[in-house]
Image (cartoon, rainbow, N blue to C red):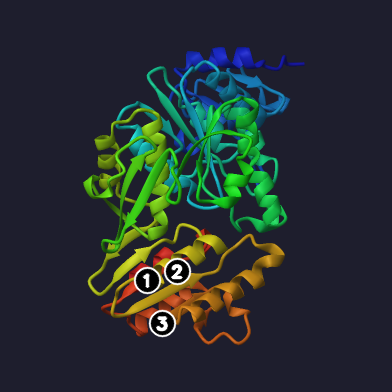
């Protein structure tokens, strides 16, 4: 029987390949270690030999029959080995590790905070939204000796997952963006979401470490009552205090600190390139984190003024015919509600909303989609197109509705919208961003 590799032995191999990991034979890093991961429809153990042939130095498998040459090593479980290696590597670093989770805007917070902190530190941050049980260890394994700060995004759709990711990443600081109606099916309702997301607070509390929290958010305030905290918000004398400035389509704001200047007339306006008033509190979170870690005020303001959103998040896109507020990366009841309420306040002669289904709501789906329709009616928004089976299944809906994004696309190509401001939002799988083509 082949001897199974220990974490210490695996770490020695990792150092031999200059800390390079590969999990995809289509994206081989020459001279790296290939980890054979498994999924419902694939078994990468079968590709270990191919990975070696493609240029990997070593391969890790968890089925003995595939450990058939001297550069392929056996472990108990490939994914667990990857996670254990990441945790072991993380333990070599005595630098701040900030974990971010929440129902909405995790990636937005991560991007804003990274923009601010990278003005002073060499940062490592989660790429895209690689925030799960595979993405978190892969991020940690990109740590290099010159890094000075780590920002880890953590996603979850069931209880226990955040605690598991914390065990891998061992964060020193934590931030929960909000608690909302996301992944209700997996969490088992809003109370399950609260319990699942607040696992980050509990982990940080056990370490006697610090969280950053939105003091205006009563749910987070209650969940964080036993934590050491640094606060931000608008309604009280928090560690960071902000004031929204109504100044066009993009977010503009002022900020100060608990011990800073309270004469708002003297404070500079931070003018961002980020659409949506709901992003103001997200910017303030980044200010709070940056200030806590001694980033100069001017550099904080510069970072947020220069940040340009991407990946279909809060982007303002100009076409030949229309102005599009593209917020189509994902959607749940809370983010959809915030987007609609924000858009209802927009000053535009002609406004349209193209809204797609919200997924992973389970038994709550019909109720939550109906609530969105009710909100649209309450706001007296008439130029609305709804897309997806969930919206289509609602009875008594007066808005134009299509079951698929393609059907909506075909309609828009023959019924052109012109000289309008258009909000596009929906869950990721709806691919609502493709509708730009017809606008």
Residue 397's spot in the image, x, y percent?
57, 85
Instruction: Name the residue: 70% across, 57% down.
Output: 189
Q: Which residue is mark 1?
A: 345
* Distance from Cα at disc 1 to Cα at disc 2: 7 Å
Q: Quadrant of residue 372?
A: bottom right
Neighbor class of circle 3 (other Cα within 10 Å; few <14, some 14-19, many 20+) is: some
Which of the two labelled residues, at mark 2 and mark 3, occupies the earlier sequence position? 2
Query: SS class of the residue under badge 1?
Result: loop
Circles 1 and 3 in contact, beta carbons < 8 Å: no
Instruction: Name the residue: 30% across, 77% down.
Output: 420
Name the foreground residue: 35 vs 306.
Answer: 306
Circles 1 and 2 in contact, beta carbons < 8 Å: yes
Name the foreground residue: 240 vs 211.
Answer: 240
Q: Which residue is mark 2?
A: 341
Instruction: Name the residue: 48% across, 71% down.
Output: 355
| Quarter placement of the N terminus | top right
């Amino acid at each position: 029987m082949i001897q199974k590799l220990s974490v210490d032995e695996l770490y020695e191999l990792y150092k031999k390949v200059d800390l390079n990991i590969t999990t995809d034979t289509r994206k081989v890093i020459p001279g790296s270690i290939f980890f054979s991961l498994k999924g419902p429809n694939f078994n990468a153990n079968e590709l270990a030999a191919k990975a070696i042939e493609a240029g990997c130095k070593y391969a890790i498998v968890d089925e003995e029959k595939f450990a058939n040459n001297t550069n392929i090593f056996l472990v108990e479980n490939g994914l667990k080995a990857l996670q254990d290696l990441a945790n072991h590597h993380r333990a070599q670093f005595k630098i701040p590790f900030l974990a971010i989770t929440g129902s909405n805007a995790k990636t937005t917070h991560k991007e804003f905070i990274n923009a601010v902190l990278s003005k002073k530190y060499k940062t490592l941050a989660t790429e895209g939204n690689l925030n799960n049980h595979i993405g978190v260890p892969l991020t940690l394994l990109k740590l290099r000796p010159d890094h000075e700060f780590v920002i880890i995004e953590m996603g979850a759709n069931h209880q226990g997952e955040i605690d598991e990711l914390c065990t891998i990443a061992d964060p020193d600081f934590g931030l929960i963006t909000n608690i909302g109606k996301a992944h209700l099916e997996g969490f088992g309702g809003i109370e399950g979401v609260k319990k699942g997301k607040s696992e980050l607070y509990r982990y940080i509390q056990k370490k006697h470490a610090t969280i950053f929290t939105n003091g205006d958010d009563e749910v987070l305030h209650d969940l964080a009552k036993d934590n050491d905290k640094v606060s931000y918000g608008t309604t009280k004398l928090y560690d960071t205090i902000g004031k929204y400035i109504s100044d066009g389509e993009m977010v503009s704001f002022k900020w100060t600190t608990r011990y800073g200047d309270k004469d708002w007339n003297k404070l500079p306006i931070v003018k961002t390139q980020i659409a949506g008033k709901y992003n103001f509190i997200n910017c303030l979170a980044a200010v709070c984190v940056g200030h806590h870690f001694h980033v100069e005020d001017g550099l904080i303001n510069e970072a947020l003024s220069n940040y340009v959103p991407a990946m279909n998040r809060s982007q303002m896109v100009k076409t030949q015919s229309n102005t599009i507020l593209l917020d189509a990366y994902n959607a749940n009841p809370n983010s959809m509600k915030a987007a609609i309420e924000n858009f209802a306040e927009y000053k535009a002669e002609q406004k349209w909303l193209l809204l797609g289904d919200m997924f992973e709501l389970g038994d709550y789906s019909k109720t939550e989609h109906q609530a969105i329709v009710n909100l649209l009616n309450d706001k007296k928004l008439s130029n609305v197109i709804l897309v997806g089976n969930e919206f289509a299944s609602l009875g008594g809906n007066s808005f134009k509705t299509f079951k698929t994004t393609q059907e909506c696309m075909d309609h828009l190509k023959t019924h052109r919208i012109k000289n309008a401001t258009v909000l596009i939002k929906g869950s990721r799988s709806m691919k609502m961003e493709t509708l730009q083509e017809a606008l």
